[in-house]
Every structure is written in structure tokens, then in C-alpha cells.
Amino acid sequence: MPLVGLKSDDRRARMEQDAKRMLLEYNRETKRLDDLYRCAAKQCGISECAFWILYTLRAEERQFTQAEICEFLIEPKQTVHSALKKLEAEGYLARTSGADLRSKRVALTEKGEQFARAWIDRVLEAEAAALCAMPEAEIRYNKLRKLKRAKKKT
């Protein structure tokens, strides 16, 4: 039903109802997407946090400090620390001292690169394929929505 011809209060109530419906759908899709990544991590045989650390290192193609990983992934320090320790013990990454000796840089080892090529690259390729299949208007809308959400957080 179009909003034209409705009283101001009715229009506002309709818009609020539409906003609630869109928010519910957005949250449902976010949960579905979260579940896809959770399943990907499970298939890799690693924790979700470990998956996202490897994903970030592979996708960004640079080294990070633990603090940067925490900030980038919006994960607690202890969660990231535990995942880093396990990944390091399994030989997937190494921590090296940078200019500031207090903060070590995290990088993929050769074993980590091989693991990331085998598992993480498949996820990155699937994401790229999904993004390429989206109509341009939908891509712009999603970017705008993310920018607005990020702006609200600041």
C-alpha cells in the first residue's frame, strides 16, 4: 500500500513497521551469513576466531599486531590471544618483533600460507563470485548501509 494519501501519523506508523520488517530480514540474513562462516571454520577444523585471523591475514596480505587483530575483528584480547597461540603451536603463523619490541607482528608461515590457499582462498573466491552476481544498485545500497552503521558507531 503506497504511503501517499495517508495521514502523517499513519505514514509514520507504516514506515516504522516497514523499518522493523527490514531490520528483522537484515538480522535473519546476517545470522545466515554468520552460519556460513561458522560452517566454513568447522570444515577447516579450526575455531571461528582462528578462521577469521587466517582470513584477515590472507585477505589483507599484511602483518598485524595482536591489538590490530582484536580491533579489526572486534574480538576480546583473550579470545584472539588463545587463537593465536593455537595457530602458532600448529605452525600456521609466527610472531616476529617489529620496530616496537613490545608488540610482535603476526604473519602466516609457509604452512599457514598453504592452509590459507587451500581453505581461505575458497571462501574469498565464493565471496567475490557472490559480489559479482549482485546487481550494481544492490552493491551500492549495501555499501551505503554499512557506512551509515559505521558512522552511528562513532
Image: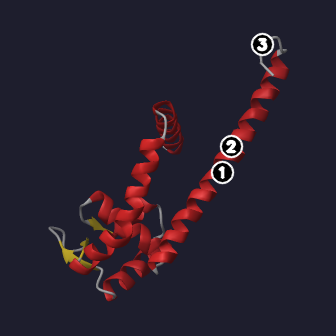
Q: Is residue 10 above or below residue 61?
A: above
> What kind of element bears circle 3?
loop
Quick one: label 2, few (<14), some, or many (20+) residues within 10 Å? few
Which residue position is annotated with label 1?
27
The answer to whether marks 3 and 1 mark residues whose Cβ atoms lie closer than 8 Å is no
CA–CA distance between discs 3 and 1? 29 Å
Q: Is residue 113 above or below residue 29?
A: below
Mark 2: which amino acid? Leu
Q: Position of residue 43 (x, y in %)?
A: 49, 76
- How far across and how far down the image is residue 44, in percent? 44, 77
Q: Residues within 10 Å of mark 1 (few under 14, many from 20)?
A: few
Q: Is residue 11 left or right of residue 129?
A: right
Left or right, residue 83 beside residue 118: right
- Ranked by sequence position, the earlier of labels 3 and 2 is 3
**Does residue 62 appear left or right of residue 140 in this picture?**
left
**Mark 1 touches mark 2? (CB < 8 Å):** yes
Where disc 1 sits, the SS reads helix
Residue at the far left: name it: 99
Q: Please, what is the three-letter code of the amino acid marked with disc 1?
A: Asn
Kind of residue indicated by mark 3 = Val
Q: Locate residue 115: give its quadrant.
A: bottom left
Residue depicted at 63% across the width and 51% down the height:
29
Q: Which residue is mark 3?
A: 4
